[in-house]
Image (spheres, helix red, strand yellow):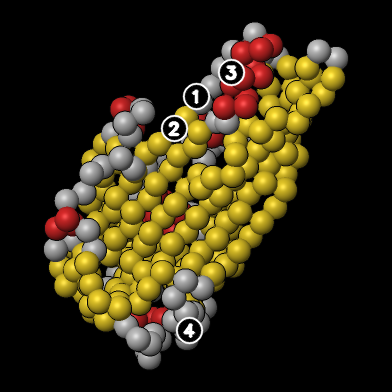
Amino acid sequence: MKSKTLFFFAFCIVLSCDNEPVGSSADNNNSGNIDNFIPSSGYWIYNVSNNSEIDPEMNFTATDSVYVYEEFDDYFSLSANDDGLANGSMNMILTSGNLYNSTRKLTFDGIISLPENIAALGLDDFTLNNVTLLDLDAENGEVMFLQEELISNTLDIQETEIPIDLNYEIKTSKIDFHNSININGIEYLNVFEGKFTFSLSVTGTFPIFGFTQSISIIEPQDIIFTTYYYAESTGLVRAESNQGFELSSELSTILDLLGVPIGFPTSFGSENIEQLIEFNLN
């Protein structure tokens, strides 16, 4: 399957306590509307830090300039860096499609493009449709969106096509709603905290001494995990994204037994932090 390389979400930066969001939770959600949390006009500038202990070539710092690209009656789109690619993992998703806001909910359509490290397992771009990003009526811990699917594919290992089954789950949840919270050294009022997760498990059918056997390639794990914060009258103020995977020990054992090298990384991990430093709402 064809895949697109994206530096998607990374983490291994050690943040000081001063940078970690600290705040108080609201007993009830804000009584306003979603337009207060995701203004459909203006621009936002973010500091982006990306780090990987496993792959130092992915370490970088950058600035993202995100702005409203098009605005229609019921939806709008974002772009970044003069219609280029965003460096931040959350804004990379948000600039890949359209955002739809109703009175109390924000949804979006877009694309997840996984990096080559994971694409080597036969994964392609994943299309996101009607994903709930914010829901002002959701309870703390409530799942706002869930998409699950089983995909059959093949994986080329040393010119041998191994049938594989991929189970994935895309989910968004509300973590909390804060009356006030300190983020990036700034005190924000009325902040929605949510999370986005992409979970995956992969099994393959291997020929072993004349028999076939189902072997776990990736045991169930979160491949992508992003925590995001939307502040009233501001928009997205921070996103902390983690990406990583680890191949199962069962796969390594079987391939060693067969004398077959894996041919792609057995583990990967990275971290990406986006911090709002400037914004202007038209």
In screen coordinates, is 140 left or right of 23? Answer: right
Which residue is at a point 33% across and 62% down the rendered structure image? 67
Question: Between 33 and 99, which is closer to the camera in this rendering?
Answer: 33
Contact, CB < 8 Å: mark 4 with mark 3? Answer: no
- List the residue tagged with mark 3: 262
In screen coordinates, is 57 left or right of 161? Answer: left
Q: Residue furthest top?
A: 259
Label whose residue precedes the other's in the sequence (4 or 3): 4
Query: Residue 70 placed where, x, y %?
Result: 44, 66
Question: Between 94 and 205, which is closer to the camera in this rendering?
Answer: 205
- Callout 3 secondary element: loop
Crowd tier of the residue under label 3, counting other residues whose Cα lies within 10 Å: few below 14, some 14–19, many 20 or above: some
Q: CA distance from mark 2 to mark 3?
A: 14 Å
- List the residue tagged with mark 2: 268
Which residue is at a point 69% across and 35% down the rendered structure image? 203
User: What residue type is disc 4 on?
Assistant: Asp
With respect to residue 105, does 84 lie above or below? above
Label whose residue precedes the other's in the sequence (2 or 3): 3
Label whose residue precedes the other's in the sequence (4 or 2): 4
Which residue is at a point 81% across and 13% down the rendered structure image? 209
Quadrant of the image for the N terminus? top right
With respect to residue 72, does 210 lie above or below? above
- List the residue tagged with mark 4: 137
Question: Between 220 and 9, which is closer to the camera in this rendering?
Answer: 220
User: What residue type is disc 3 on?
Assistant: Ile
- List the residue tagged with mark 1: 265
Determine if residue 39 is in view.
Answer: no
Contact, CB < 8 Å: mark 2 with mark 1? Answer: yes
